[in-house]
Amino acid sequence: MCGIVGYTGNKAALPILIGGLKKLEYRGYDSAGIAIGGPSAFILRRCKGKVSALDKLVSSEKINGKTGLGHTRWATHGQPSEENAHPHTDCRGRIVVVHNGIIENYIALRKKLKAKKHKFRSETDTEIIPHLIEEKLKKEKNLLKAVRKAIADIRGSYALGIMSSDEPGTIIAARKDTPLIIGLGKNENFIASDIPAILKHTRDIILLDDMETAVIKPDSVAVFDSAGRTVKKKISRIRWNPSMAEREGYRHFMLKEIFEQPRAIQDTLRGKLNPAKGYIHLEDIGLTVPYVKKIRKIFIVACGTAYHAGMVGKFLIEKMLGIPCETDIASEFRYRSPVMNKSDLFIIISQSGETADTLAALRMAKKRGLKTLSICNVIGSSAARETNGMIFTHAGPEIGVASTKAFTTQLIALYLLTLYLGRIRGAIPRQEAVRIMTAILNIPQQIRLILRKSKAIAKTARKYSKKRDFLYIGRNLNYPIALEGALKLKEISYIHAEGYAAGEMKHGPIALIDKDMPIVAIATAGGVYEKLLSNVQEARARNGIIIAVANTGDKNISKSASDVLCVPVTLEELSPLLNVIPLQLLSYYIALYRRCDIDQPRNLAKSVVVE
Ligand code: G6P
């Protein structure tokens, strides 16, 4: 996720771009840049760090140009650095491009362009775009036509802002699977990734749709479909106040992030699965085939929500690969005496990549000579830099302290890894891999179905929002989900909640159950379904209130449960991905009814960089 803003009009572009970028920093802030039309060439300024660093860089300059593009970056391809910061240019600096998204076939395109003598200066996927346009302009006279030809060669997702010094005052915009809006003003127009960037200047916007391109000039906006036909677009008037706009109208970042999960998962999967061939593209994590074949044991170490993802990973790895796997909490791992061998693979999971205990555990494993891998949401983070390989979760910046979209994308990374290792080691037959991949690709749509029922979940939440204690129970792959559900509730609502392996209830927690105790039971289809039903009966017999997470249409569970939070049917292995969604929403709405500070709960921090 990155932020884009563009301006063309009769005012100086610089302050408008800087102001807009500051509003988009929630989308990423590891480097920033601007390109502004000058008398003969573009004035290009880029730097590592936040928009404030860019602001400082240009503060003493007189940049008066009235057309420009700005970008704040969340690194995906290439470290945060000045070279990798946008805008990127063609060989001659006559075309500038800002991009948000991922170009999947950039390696092949880069190779082709290099063969045609194009000079690349960054490690980004984006840089192929200005060069591709430069190439197309050899045959096309008009920038729009060249852009359309260029994007026809691209596979992936993009929101693009493009300028050429041959067409001063014009911005070309294009979009596929990544948001881009056009803001309409008087003798001035804007583009932006999101409304807050331009809300100070206009409330009239056009939402660009997938495969559309637009030509934006100070006094006109023309939108075209993929065939080049003019499209008549609806103008929407935005009534949000500025702080609502940052949350895209959602009341809290946490809710926005819960609803972003289908997109985040799609982005994490993008370009990785090829179900037709039963192939998983994960070569870039740097594990060679001979090494993969020799792995004897896998360690997964993490904290908090990431640890729960790691617990699901253990189930997957042991069940699907037959490799022993130990998952541990980093703060425990670093102070015990784990038996590690050089042929073991060491994985850390961390949203921020900066959690002190997780990094300490990683350094311990490195000292013992293990190969290391991170599953991480921040490209330039310590975790990413210090591990041999990385699986990047494309969740985008997570602002709510309670982790949601980072968790589900961490799970996706673990599925990808398991499938990848399983295919190399021959532990997962091709047909089985295809079956799982097909079901994974269906997950974003299934999550959307759950999200559509959020009102019903809010109703359940309201009923129980005054309770003092909650129990969450699950078994097997969904035991970690019970832990995660309980963690979400205590983090943001301050209600005491415990996650338990359902089969352990009889060894203690069942003593807690009475008519005031809600028990959230994860009871979706699978090998332990009937056992879970028995555990539910035991709780019911002690007058416990059962809130079940169950498959839509499950009649058995509705006999015992007071409330059923429905999820669609998927493969048992994938069920954690769906089951956690209603639990996130349940916690959110309970906290909302209790008027808690949801995005910044008391005593917690988003990233725990001290021991
Ligand atoms: C903090 C956050 C949690 C997160 C944990 C691990 O406790 O509040 O949401 O799961 O740290 O953070 P990491 O960045 O390593 O995933």
Image: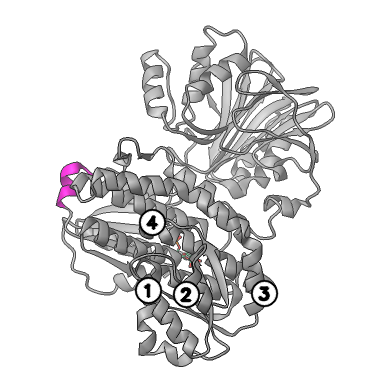
Q: Where is residue 12? Give x, y as percent.
A: 76, 29
Mark 4 CB within 8 Å of ligand 1: no
Residue ID for mark 4? 571
Lower position in the chain sequence, tag 2 or tag 4: 2
Give SS at disc 3: helix
Please state which amino acid type lies under the numbered disc 4: Leu
Please state which amino acid type lies under the numbered disc 2: Ala
Q: Quadrant of the C terminus?
A: bottom left
Q: Residues within 10 Å of mark 3 (few under 14, many from 20)?
A: some
Give SS at disc 1: helix
Residue ID for mark 1? 530
Q: Which residues are magenta?
A: 287-294
Asked if residue 31 is positioned above or below residue 321 in the image, the reply reads: above
Q: Report the Cα–Cα distance between label 3 and label 4.
A: 31 Å
- Given contact means CB atoms under 8 Å apart, are the residues at marks 3 and 4 in contact? no
Residue ID for mark 2? 521
In the drawing, what numbered circle is on residue 561?
none
Q: Report the Cα–Cα distance between label 1 and label 2.
A: 12 Å
Lower position in the chain sequence, tag 1 or tag 3: 3
Our reading of the magenta stretch's main secondary structure is: helix
Give SS at disc 4: loop
Please state which amino acid type lies under the numbered disc 1: Glu
Q: Residues within 10 Å of mark 1 (few under 14, many from 20)?
A: some
Tell me if residue 140 is in the magenta stretch. no
Q: For the point 71% across and 45% down, which residue is it?
A: 196
Q: For the point 38% across and 40% down, which residue is it?
A: 272
- Given contact means CB atoms under 8 Å apart, are the residues at marks 1 and 3 in contact? no
